[in-house]
C-alpha cells in the first residue's frame, strides 16, 4: 500500500472529519457534558486547519489565532462548566431533555 | 517517516474523536473525556509535524493538563449515575446523521476537488521567540483584551459556582 | 477553656527560622547516629534486651537445692489464674507420693498455656510453697498452639533451682529474728 | 565502528535514541528509584536514631530487590466495587509522565559524538510542564476508580493541589528564561557554564520552584493526598501489591525528574565551574564524568527532598492552598517584574 505524500489537503481533510465528528456529537448526544466535549473537538478541528494553513502559507498569523482560540476555549470551559454545575444543582440532571423550561 | 507519523496521528485523532462522540464501550462521560484527552494529545503530535512546537506544547499544557482535568472534576463531582438508557429517537439520529453526512461530503469534496495546497512548500517554524514577537507587537491589543477576558471568566466561574447566589 | 491564639510575628509567619531549626535538630540526630553510633535501637535477635530486676516474664516451676519439686499441687494458682492458663492434675489417692519431707503430694501434671498467660504474677503471689516464679523470659515462640502449652518437665527445666528460697528455712530465720527483737505491741 | 557507517542518518538516529532511552530509564532512572527508596528509609532511620534496613545484604543494599520481589509475589487484589478499567489504568498513568519528562533533560555533554539528551527540543521547558500536568490524570483516575469516599477525597485534594502549584511553578521559572533568552534546556546549561549558576541569580525563583516541586510530587510537608490519619491512605487506599508499588515508584521517579529539572535550571546541569568541566567533553572519560556530575547533583537534591520529609510537619489543607495562591503566585509575579525591570535597565545602558 502506498499512500500519497502528505500535503495541506490531508490536514484539511482530517480537520473537516474531526469537525463533522464534533458536530455529530453536538447534534446526537444528550448529555450536556458530552456535548461540551464535542464542542471542544470542533474547536480543535478549527485549530488544526489554522495551523496547517499557517504552515503552508508561510504566515504565523494562523498560529497566533490558534493561541487565541485555545485561551478563549479555556475561559469558555471555565464559565460553561460552572454553568453546568449550577444547572445541575437546580435540576439534578445534566441531560438536555430535562432542561426544557423554555419550551411550551 | 513524517508521512507515516501523519497517518498514525491522524488515524488516532479521528478514532479517539469518534470514541468521544459515539462510544460503544460505555456511556460514562469519564470515558468520553479520557478519549478526548487522547485525541488532544495526538493532535499535538500533528502540530509538531506542522512545526508548530509552541502550540503543540500549549495544546498539551492547556487542553490536556487544565481544561480536561476541569472536565473530569465536574463529571466526577456531579456523579452522574449510569443514566437509564433513554429511548433512542430513530428520527433524530437519522436526521442528524444525514445532515452531518451531507455537510462532511460537501467539505471533503470541496477540499479534494480544489487541491488547496498545490505547489505550496511547507515552511516556517512556530517557535516560541517568533510567536512571542508577533504576539507582543502586531497582536498586542488582542492579547491584552484576552487577559481581561480570562479575568472576567475567572470571576464569572467563581460567582456561578457559589452555593447561595442571591 | 479558651486557648488564645497568639499573633505570629513576621519571622514566624515566614516559616524560615522554624525550617532552619528543623534542619539543625535533624542534622544533629543524623550525625550522632551515623558517626557516633548512638542509635537507640538494638539488633534484636542477635542482641537481646537485658530485662531489669523484678521483670514479670514467663511463669516457671522451680526446684529447691536438693532437687525436689517444690510444688505441692495445692491448685491455688490454678484457682487464682485470671485467664485460666494453668491446669494442674493432682496425683489422687493412688498417686505417687511426694519425694521430700514436709510435702503431702506433688503434681502429676502441671501445664501452663503460654498463649493464655497474661504474666500478671498472681500465681507467684499466691503460691504458699514459693514454687512458681515469673522468670525473665519474654520471647516465647512456637510453631503450633500445642507447642505453646508447657508441661511439667519443660517448666521445671526452664525454671531451674532456686537456692535460698527454701521457704521453711526462711520462716525459721524470721521467727528467730522476731525472738531477738520482740515485736512491740 | 564500521557497521554504523552502513546505516542511514535516520537509522542511526533511531538506534542512538533507543539506546539513550533504554539506558536512561533502565540503567539510571529505575535503579535510582529503587535506591532512593532505600536511601529514604536509611536517612529517616538515622534522623530518628535508628539503624534502618540492614538485613538483606551488607547495610541492606539488596533491600530494594527484596521489596520489589515482595510486591511482585503479593496477591494482586482488585476490590469488587471499583471501576475496573480506570483502576488498572491509573497506576500506569501516574508512572509514565514521570518517565517522559526525562526525554528533554540534558544529562551530560557528549559521549563520543552523541549529545547526551534524548530529545533536544526547543520548547523543552514547555514540554516538561505539559507532561507534568498530565501526571494529574493518574491521581484523579485513581480516586475516581476506587469508587469510595476516602480515595475520592484524596484524589480531588491531590489534583487540586497539583494544579494550583503548577501555576506557581510555571511562573517561578519565567525569570530564568528571561535571563537565558531560550526555552531549550541545553541553552540554559550553556548560559550557566563558568559558574554563573542561576540559583545565585534567582534565589527567589529557585525557592518557589523547590517548594512547588515538593507539592507536585506530593511529598511532605505537602503530602495531604495520602495523609494517613485523615484520609485512610488517600487515592491509593484500594491498591495493593504491584499497583501500589507503581504509585510508590511514580512518587520517587517524580522526585528524581524534578531534581533533575532543578539541577538543569538552577545548578548548572552537568557543569562544574572549575577544572574545565564547564565545556562540552571531547573524550569518553570527560563525557562519563559529566554524566557523573549530573547524577551527583541529583543525588544531593534527593537528599534534600528526603531530609525535609523527616523535618517538617504536614501543612493543613487551607494553609497549603493559601501558601500556593496567596503567597507564591504574587511573589513569583513580583520576581518576574523585578527581573524585567533589571533587564530593561541593563538594556538601556
Image (cartoon, rainbow, N blue to C red):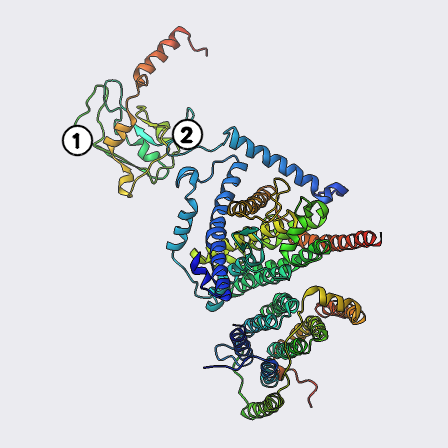
Q: Position of residue D136 (x, y in %)?
A: 58, 62
Which of the two discs, 1 and 2, labels the residue nearer the N terminus? 2
Give above or below for D42 relative to B57.
Answer: above
Q: Position of residue D70 (x, y in %)?
A: 39, 51
Picture quadrant of residue D195: top right
Q: Position of residue A65 (x, y in %)?
A: 72, 74
* SS label for mark 2: loop
Give above or below for D228 relative to C151.
Answer: below
Regarding residue C30, the answer to whether it shows in the image is yes
Regarding residue D232, the answer to whether it shows in the image is no
Give above or below for D318 relative to C17.
Answer: below
Task: Indicate left or right for C135 with A85 as reference.
Answer: left
Q: Residue at x 49, y 55 (%)?
A: D25
Residue linked to disc 2 = C49
How far apart are the two marked residues, 1 and 2, measured between alpha carbons? 46 Å
Picture quadrant of residue A98: bottom right
Mark 1 or 2, closer to the camera: 2
The residue lying toward the viewer, choosing from D59 and D342, is D342
Give above or below for D318 relative to C111.
Answer: below
Q: Residue furthest right?
A: D349
Q: Position of residue B99 (x, y in %)?
A: 60, 92
Q: Residue furthest top?
A: C180
Write down the chain letter for disc 1. Answer: C
Write down the chain letter for disc 2. Answer: C
Q: Mark on residue C93?
A: 1
* SS label for mark 1: loop
Q: Residue at x 72, y 44 (%)?
A: C14
The residue lying toward the viewer, choosing from C127 and D11, is D11
The residue lying toward the viewer, choosing from B116 and B60, is B116
Number of labels in the image equals 2
- Report the quarter where the N terminus of chain D lies: bottom left
Amino acid at each position: 500500500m502506498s499512500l500519497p505524500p502528505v500535503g495541506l489537503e490531508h490536514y484539511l481533510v482530517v480537520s473537516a472529519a474531526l469537525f463533522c465528528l464534533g458536530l455529530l456529537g453536538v447534534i446526537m448526544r444528550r448529555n450536556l457534558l458530552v456535548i461540551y466535549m464535542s464542542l471542544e473537538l470542533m474547536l480543535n478541528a478549527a485549530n488544526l486547519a489554522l495551523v496547517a494553513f499557517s504552515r503552508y502559507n508561510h504566515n504565523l498569523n494562523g498560529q497566533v489565532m490558534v493561541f487565541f482560540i485555545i485561551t478563549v476555549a479555556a475561559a469558555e470551559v471555565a464559565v460553561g462548566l460552572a454553568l453546568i454545575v449550577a444547572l445541575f444543582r437546580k435540576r439534578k440532571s445534566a441531560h438536555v431533555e430535562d432542561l426544557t423550561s423554555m419550551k411550551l | 517517516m513524517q508521512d507515516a507519523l501523519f497517518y498514525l496521528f491522524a488515524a488516532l485523532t479521528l478514532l479517539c474523536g469518534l470514541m468521544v462522540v459515539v462510544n460503544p464501550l460505555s456511556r460514562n462521560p469519564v470515558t468520553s473525556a479520557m478519549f478526548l484527552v487522547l485525541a488532544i494529545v495526538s493532535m499535538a503530535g500533528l502540530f509538531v509535524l506542522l512545526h508548530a512546537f509552541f502550540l503543540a506544547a500549549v495544546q498539551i499544557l492547556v487542553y490536556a493538563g487544565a481544561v480536561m482535568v476541569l472536565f473530569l472534576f465536574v463529571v466526577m463531582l456531579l456523579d452522574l449515575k449510569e443514566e437509564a438508557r433513554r429511548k433512542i429517537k430513530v428520527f433524530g439520529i437519522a436526521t442528524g446523521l444525514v445532515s452531518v453526512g451531507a455537510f462532511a461530503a460537501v467539505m471533503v469534496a470541496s477540499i479534494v476537488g480544489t487541491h488547496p495546497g498545490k505547489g505550496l512548500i511547507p515552511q516556517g517554524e512556530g517557535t516560541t521567540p517568533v510567536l512571542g514577537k508577533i504576539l507582543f507587537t502586531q497582536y498586542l491589543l488582542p492579547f491584552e483584551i484576552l487577559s481581561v477576558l480570562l479575568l472576567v471568566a475567572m470571576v464569572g466561574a467563581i460567582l456561578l459556582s457559589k452555593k447561595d447566589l442571591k | 477553656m479558651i486557648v488564645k491564639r497568639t499573633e505570629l510575628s513576621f519571622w514566624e509567619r515566614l516559616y524560615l527560622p522554624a525550617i532552619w531549626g528543623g534542619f539543625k535538630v535533624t542534622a544533629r540526630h543524623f550525625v550522632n547516629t551515623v558517626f557516633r553510633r548512638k542509635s537507640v535501637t538494638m539488633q534484636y535477635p542477635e542482641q537481646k534486651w537485658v530485662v531489669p530486676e523484678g521483670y514479670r516474664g514467663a511463669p516457671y516451676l522451680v526446684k529447691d537445692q536438693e532437687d525436689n519439686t517444690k510444688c505441692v499441687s495445692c491448685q491455688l494458682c490454678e484457682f487464682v489464674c485470671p485467664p485460666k492458663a494453668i491446669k494442674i492434675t493432682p496425683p489422687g489417692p493412688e498417686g505417687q507420693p511426694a519425694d521430700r519431707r514436709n510435702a503431702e503430694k506433688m503434681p502429676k501434671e502441671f501445664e501452663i498455656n503460654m498463649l493464655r498467660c497474661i504474666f500478671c504474677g498472681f500465681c507467684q503471689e499466691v503460691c504458699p510453697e514459693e514454687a512458681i516464679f515469673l522468670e525473665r523470659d519474654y520471647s516465647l515462640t512456637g510453631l503450633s498452639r500445642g507447642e505453646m502449652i508447657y508441661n511439667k518437665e519443660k517448666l521445671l527445666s526452664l525454671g531451674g533451682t532456686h537456692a535460698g528460697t527454701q521457704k521453711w528455712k526462711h520462716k525459721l530465720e524470721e521467727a528467730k529474728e522476731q525472738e531477738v527483737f520482740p515485736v512491740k505491741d | 565502528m564500521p557497521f554504523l557507517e552502513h546505516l542511514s542518518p535516520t537509522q542511526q538516529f533511531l538506534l542512538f535514541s533507543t539506546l539513550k532511552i533504554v539506558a536512561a530509564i533502565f540503567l539510571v532512572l529505575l535503579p535510582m528509584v529503587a535506591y532512593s527508596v532505600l536511601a529514604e528509609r536509611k536517612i529517616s532511620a538515622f534522623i530518628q536514631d535508628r539503624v534502618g534496613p540492614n538485613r538483606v545484604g551488607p547495610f541492606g543494599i539488596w533491600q530494594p530487590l527484596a521489596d520489589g520481589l515482595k510486591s511482585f509475589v503479593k496477591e494482586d487484589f482488585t476490590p469488587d466495587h471499583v471501576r475496573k478499567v480506570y483502576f488498572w489504568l491509573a497506576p500506569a498513568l501516574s508512572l509514565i509522565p514521570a518517565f517522559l519528562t526525562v526525554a528533554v533533560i540534558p544529562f551530560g555533554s557528549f559521549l563520543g559524538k552523541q549529545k547526551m539528551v534524548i530529545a533536544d527540543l526547543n520548547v523543552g521547558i514547555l514540554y516538561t510542564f505539559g507532561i507534568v500536568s498530565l501526571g494529574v490524570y493518574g491521581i484523579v483516575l485513581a480516586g475516581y476508580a476506587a469508587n469510595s469516599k476516602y480515595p475520592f477525597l484524596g484524589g480531588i485534594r491531590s489534583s487540586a493541589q497539583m494544579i494550583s502549584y503548577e501555576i506557581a511553578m510555571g511562573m517561578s521559572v519565567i525569570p530564568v528564561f528571561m535571563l537565558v533568552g531560550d526555552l531549550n534546556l541545553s541553552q540554559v546549561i550553556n548560559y550557566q557554564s563558568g559558574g554563573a549558576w542561576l540559583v545565585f541569580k534567582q534565589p527567589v525563583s529557585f525557592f518557589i520552584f523547590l517548594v512547588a516541586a515538593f507539592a507536585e510530587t506530593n511529598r511532605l510537608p505537602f503530602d495531604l493526598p495520602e495523609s494517613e490519619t485523615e484520609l485512610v491512605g488517600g487515592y491509593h487506599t484500594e491498591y495493593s501489591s504491584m499497583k501500589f508499588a507503581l504509585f510508590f515508584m511514580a512518587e520517587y521517579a517524580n522526585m528524581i525528574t524534578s531534581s533533575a529539572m532543578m539541577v538543569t535550571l538552577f545548578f548548572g546541569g552537568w557543569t562544574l565551574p572549575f577544572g574545565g568541566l564547564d565545556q562540552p567533553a571531547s573524550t569518553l572519560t570527560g563525557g562519563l564524568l559529566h554524566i557523573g556530575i549530573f547524577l551527583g547533583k541529583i543525588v544531593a537534591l534527593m537528599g534534600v527532598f528526603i531530609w525535609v520529609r523527616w523535618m517538617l510537619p504536614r501543612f493543613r489543607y487551607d494553609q497549603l492552598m493559601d501558601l500556593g495562591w496567596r503567597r507564591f503566585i504574587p511573589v513569583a509575579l513580583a520576581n518576574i517584574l523585578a527581573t524585567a525591570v533589571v533587564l530593561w535597565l541593563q538594556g538601556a545602558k
